[in-house]
Amino acid sequence: MPIWKRNLFVCWFGMFITGVGMSQIAPVLPLYIDQLGIHDTALIEQFSGIAFGITFIISAVFSPIWGQAADRFGRKPMLLRASLGMAIVVFTMGFAQDVYQLIGLRLLQGVITGYATACTTLIATQTDKEHAGWALGTLSTASIAGSLLGPMIGGYIGEAFGLQYVFFITGALLLLAFITTLLFVKESFIRHDRKVLNGKEIWQTVPEKEITIIMFVTSFVLTLALYSVEPIITVYISQLSDTSHIALLAGMTFSASGLANIIAAPGLGKLSDRIGAQKVMLVALVVAGIIFIPQAFAQNPWQLMGLRFLLGLAAAGLLPSVNILIKKITPDSLTGRVFGFTISAQYLGAFGGSVLGGQVAAYCGIRYVFFITSTLLLINAVWVYFSVYKRLA
């Protein structure tokens, strides 16, 4: 097996587990905070929002920093640092004595992260042009699938084994990711530049600045769209059905997009190699924007679940296309830093989507979450058409 392909499989597992580690706390967070001694409902909601969101915000700040470190010291050292660090921190969350320790550990988790940035950079720089789309498409499924399936996995572990075991089991899996990375990932790292560039100098050396910015925005809008439903999904399911299995149906509906992403992303990555990433990206944005509209008119949970699955199929063409175009227009010496900013945009999108969904639903109604998200995706599609598609065509 070629080295890049073996590295891809190991990195996929590691990115999936780190994605789970970032998001698995969502469904058990209010229950765990109550277990830690906070019993007032308003305070539980407040602390839950802080504990969940702080990891994504801090990760967005530190991803470019770890991307720069990957360009300077190699990608494998960053993989080992992030996987071992997150294994220790997530495992330790199971021993938290109060909510402030939990928030502090979630903050530290955001600082330590960087596995996805190093993985994306490693695969992008190792893979030949003919296989880049398939490789990056396959890799992109890991992070999104881990983040979208994480809440369902966390909820199942919490219900089956106890809340603390959510952290213990996830920490053990992260340790396994560290061991497999240590043993099986191979890298012959050659540093391309000896001078440490500051942010302004890095930006000056990026050849296609406008396209790079559009890629950042597209990454942000995609993850915002996928996560906008998270804070409202349980309420929406309860409106669509009178079943007693609301939590289970909500988890299945939210995770349907992740399952579809796993199925479709490798194939769409291959298609990007053949016809051009900009074409796949444009079609995926338009289709995803359209699919959001009927979600507002779903009559039962199964219709919503099916539409979320279709959304995942469309969205699967976006992140691989973004990564392929960034690889194409970015010098190898800068790929870690540029991919770091892309991952930051995704973290901000995950946080922004959760905030947007909750606020819009509270002030305008749940259906408007889908309308506004659809509008953002279609506006992004128009921007991509005029500034990327026509330019590269």
Image (tube, rainbow, N blue to C red):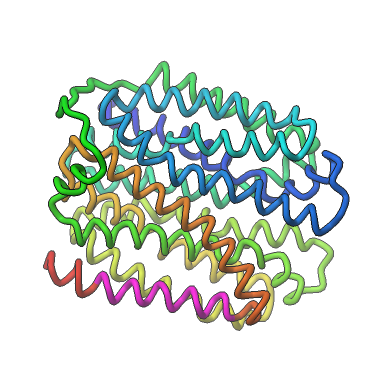
Residue 350 percent across, percent down from the top left: 51, 56
Report whether residue 317 is seen. Answer: no
Tell me: 169 left or right of 163: left
Vertical position of residue 79 compared to residue 67: above or below: above
Vertical position of residue 310 compared to residue 138: above or below: below
The residue lying toward the viewer, choosing from 248 and 322, is: 322
**Which stretch is magenta?**
368-384
Quadrant where the N terminus lies? top left
The residue lying toward the viewer, choosing from 157 and 34, is: 34
Vertical position of residue 106 compared to residue 179: above or below: below
Q: How many marks?
A: 0
Who's the residue at 24% across and 38% down the image? 198
Indicate yes or no whether the magenta region holds residue 224: no
The residue lying toward the viewer, choosing from 71 and 280, is: 71
Q: Determine the image quadrant of residue 212.
A: bottom left
Indicate yes or no whether the magenta region holds residue 373: yes
Tell me: 253 left or right of 278: right
